[in-house]
Structure formats: C-alpha cells, structure tokens
Image (spheres, helix red, strand yellow):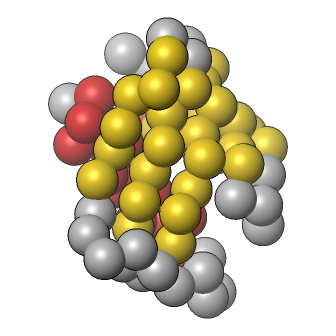
Amino acid sequence: MRIKVKVKPGASKNEVKKIDEYLYEVRTTTIPEKGKANEKVIDLLSDFFDVPKSKIKIVKGQTSREKEVEVVE
C-alpha cells in the first residue's frame, strides 16, 4: 500500500498519527541531517505497521517533509 506522510522533524517526541486512510503524520526528535530523519521515519513506521524496516520504502520526497511511502505487508 502507498501512503502519504507528513514529517515533523525536531519534535519533542517520536510518534505516528493516522490522519485518514492514506495520510499519516510522523513526528520525530531527529533533525533532518544526512538522511537521519528519513531513517527514523522508516523505523517509526516499521513499529507502527508491525513490519520489518526492509518492507518500507520512501518513494517520493526524500528531501521534503511530505513523502510518499510504500509499505509492503
């Protein structure tokens, strides 16, 4: 399934919030530097959907706060 993710880096806590069926908000304490925030987003989504990190891929928006992510269940 493909979902849209709005990322809020530098937040006070790490969390994933479902906005609607295909839109999620991910807050991460990690700053967007050298792909660290993207790694944390994948880590948080992996826990949220209970799938291995290898099953989650950022398809669009590598450097944007709005991303399109593919989750293989």
Determine whether 59 is above or below 73 in the image: below
Residue 17 position in % (x across, y down) = 35, 38
Residue 46 position in % (x across, y down) = 31, 42
Question: Is residue 52 at all visible to an observer of this figure?
Answer: no
Determine whether 59 is above or below 20 in the image: below
- Residue beneath the point at 79% across and 43% down: 60
The answer to whether 61 appears left or right of 22 in the picture is right
The answer to whether 15 appears left or right of 34 in the picture is left
Total labels drawn: 0
Residue 56 position in % (x across, y down) = 48, 38
Determine whether 53 is above or below 9 in the image: above
The answer to whether 54 appears left or right of 65 in the picture is left
Q: Where, by quadrant of the figure, is residue 41 drawn?
A: bottom left
Q: Where, by quadrant of the figure, is residue 59 drawn?
A: top right
Which of these two is toward me, 48 or 17?
A: 17
- Residue beneath the point at 56% across and 56% down: 7
Residue 27 position in % (x across, y down) = 41, 59
Which of these two is toward me, 15 or 36?
A: 15
- Residue beneath the point at 48% across and 43% down: 25
